[in-house]
Each structure stands twice: as structure tokens, then as C-alpha cells.
Amino acid sequence: MGLFSFFKRQLLEVIEWKDSSKDTIVYRFPLTERDEIMNSSTLVVRPSQVAVFVHKGQVADVFSAGTYKLSTENIPFLTKLLSLPTGFNSRIKAEVYFINTKQFIGQKWGTQNPVMMRDADFGNVRIRAFGIYSYKVVNPKLFMEEVFGSNELYQVSDASDYLRPYIVQGISDAVAESKISALDLASNYKEFSEDVINACQEQFKSLGLKLCGVTIENISLPEEVEKALDERTKIGVMEDKIGTYTQYQAANALRDAAKNEGGGNLAGLGVGLGAGTGIGKLFSENLTMENKPKEEYAVCSKCGAKLRKNAKFCPECGQRQGAVCPKCGASVGKTAKFCPECGESLKKKCKNCGAELKKTSKFCPECGTKVE
């Protein structure tokens, strides 16, 4: 009985993994050299888990979520194993791996080195990018054969260094092939993400994985390019006052000249003052021209000559400008109904019947006489 009791203690009755971590992909069930799985043991596989049985270095069976009573019917290789003498259940010496099949989200990726791209506005520029991605195990057997092997524990951090370059490569290809301007990259993050998923899916599939999502949080330009963009923005804001990049630079030069003491060199000081004066004059003249109101002109109604807006007579043909009284020739306002000099009615009337006419009338509405 003592020998019987010794062996009985080594036969496992329940095999399960109560996962309390957030980043464990593979967990090997702890078995000592004396532990043996007996026929009729209970296997518990929780949701988002699979159990993989390995016997003599080969994957024997894969169990999805559920509770199983192990027997020769559901583990075919049990029938090939020897049994102890009468009084023992059939036993098996095997390794059990639990693989987490949930989606591992929030995995960070980023470009360690800048990625070169050809841009229509800036020429060849280097960009950096970062974001997050998510994936999960969809083929446990292939994942075990290709990635984690026989490790007792395999975590997300172990897979990150292996998977991150795939994402970075996908981003580099997507940006380069799109030929989108660097200024328009931010408006195409979603399209780039979809391109990366499509480009990397086969590589993930070959490892027994599925790339579930990629998010681009930021694509940044080199510091010198960003400074140039900031200056261009300043130019746009100040365009009403300065107008051109040269004038903006002149304003900066004036500020620097004012700060420069010349290091005690009188010649340098003179040059600095002269340059400052010249630049200040240029800047002042430009602002004066910008603020000077534009002069408006009119056209002579008779000869078409260019006139000042308020001119009363044409300098070319002498034609009086504006409305005039038909009787005395005095100048009258556009809305006046009677001449302020002689009192003549300024309403347009038909010469035939005396009916009142509109200014645009070509024929009298009463008698049909043509208006001259």
C-alpha cells in the first residue's frame, strides 16, 4: 500500500491556469519529473485560452476553452502509452502549455531612427512616427513552433522587440508609396493605418498571429523643418503689415543690429548703425506704402478719359461731369428732383405727351415715342 499511495500522489487530477497577469502570452503548467497526467484527469481551459499538449517534443493535442475529462477517446496518443500494473489508471508523461488568445492592446511602436521620404515642398526630409498596435494568437500550434518554442513563460515584452520592426517597416512603406506632402500627413493617419495592417498581416500570419489594429498617434518632421514652418506661419499672420519674407528678415536684422554693441570696433559700429538705418528706412517706407490709401479714379462719360473721382470737368474734352440741370447747366445731385439754381424739374418727361419717364426708359410707356 505504501508504494501504491506514493504513485497515487503523483497523478494529477485537475490541470488549469488561473491567469492573473495582463501580459502573459504562454504559460507552461508546472510538472515535476514525478508528475504524471492520468486517464480521467480534468482539464480546465478558461475563456481566451487554449491548452497545448506536447509529448516527446511534438504537439499532440490542442484544446480550446472548456472543461474536459481526459481519456483515450479525446487524447489519441494515450492509447499508445504503457500502463502501470493493475490498480492504476492509464497515465501519461507530457507537457501542458496554456496560450492566451485574447487581444493584446496598447502595444507601443516607434521609429528608432528617422525615416527618409521625398517631399514636393521640402525635398528629402526625415520623419519620425509613433503609435500603438494590437494583436492576438490565432494559430497556437504554429505560434509555438515558430516563436516561443519550449519556454516556460513567454510575455508581451518578449514579442514586442520581434514584432515592432514589422510595424515600422509598414509605416515607412505606406508613407513613401503615398507620395503625400509632409504637410498633409496628419490628415491621412487612418489611411496609413489600414495600409500598414494590410502590408503586415502576412508576416503576422506566418507566426500564428493576427494584427488586429494599428494607430498612428504622431508623425513629426525634423526640428529645422518645423522651425521653417513656424516662420512661414508668422509671415502669414504678419502679411498685412510686412507682406514679404525679405521685409520680415529686415525687421529681424534691425532688432539684431540694435542689440549689437560692435565689440568696441567703431567701424563695425558704424556699419551696424548704417545698416540699421537703411533697414529701418526700408521698413518704414514699406509700412507707409501699405497704410497709404489707394486713390480712386472715374471715367469721363464722353471721351472715356481717366479722371479723379470728384472731378467736375474732363481735362481732355471739357465735358462737365455728374448730373446737370437741362435748363441752366448747374450741377445737381443724383437724387435731386429740382435744380437748386433755377428750380427746373429734373424729372425725365416725354417730349410728345409729357408723361414721366424712368431714367432707363427707351420709349414712352404712354405714347410710344422714342426717348432721345
Image: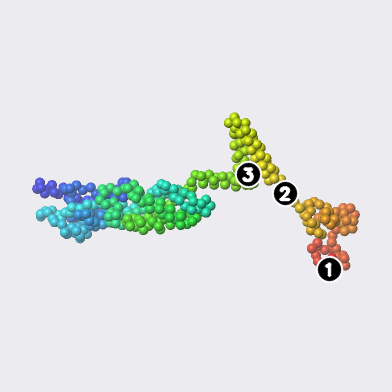
Q: Residue at x 61, y 34 (%)?
A: 268
Q: Amino acid at mark 1?
A: Lys
- Coordinates of residue 154 in the picture (x, y in percent): 29, 48
Q: Is residue 45 visible?
A: no
Marks 3 and 2 sit apart, C-alpha to C-alpha, by: 21 Å
Q: Which residue is mark 3?
A: 247
Which mark is on residue 370? Answer: 1
Earlier-in-chain disc, 3 versus 1: 3
Q: Residue at x 79, y 53 (%)?
A: 307
* 3 or 2: mark nearer the eye: 3
Q: Is residue 159 visible?
A: yes
Q: Residue at x 84, y 63 (%)?
A: 356
* 2 or 1: mark nearer the eye: 2
- Coordinates of residue 184 in the picture (x, y in percent): 51, 53
Which mark is on residue 202? Answer: none
- Coordinates of residue 306 in the picture (x, y in percent): 78, 55
Q: Residue at x 60, y 31 (%)?
A: 265
Sort mark 1 into few (<14), some (14-19) or many (20+) by Cα contacts within 10 Å.
few
Sort mark 3 into few (<14), some (14-19) or many (20+) by Cα contacts within 10 Å.
some
Earlier-in-chain disc, 3 versus 2: 3
- Coordinates of residue 23 in the picture (x, y in percent): 33, 47
Q: Amino acid at mark 2?
A: Lys
Earlier-in-chain disc, 2 versus 1: 2
Label 3, secondary structure: give it: helix
In the foreground, 337 or 194: 194
Q: Which residue is mark 2?
A: 294
Label 2, secondary structure: give it: loop
Q: Among all residues in the image, which is located at the extreme left?
A: 1
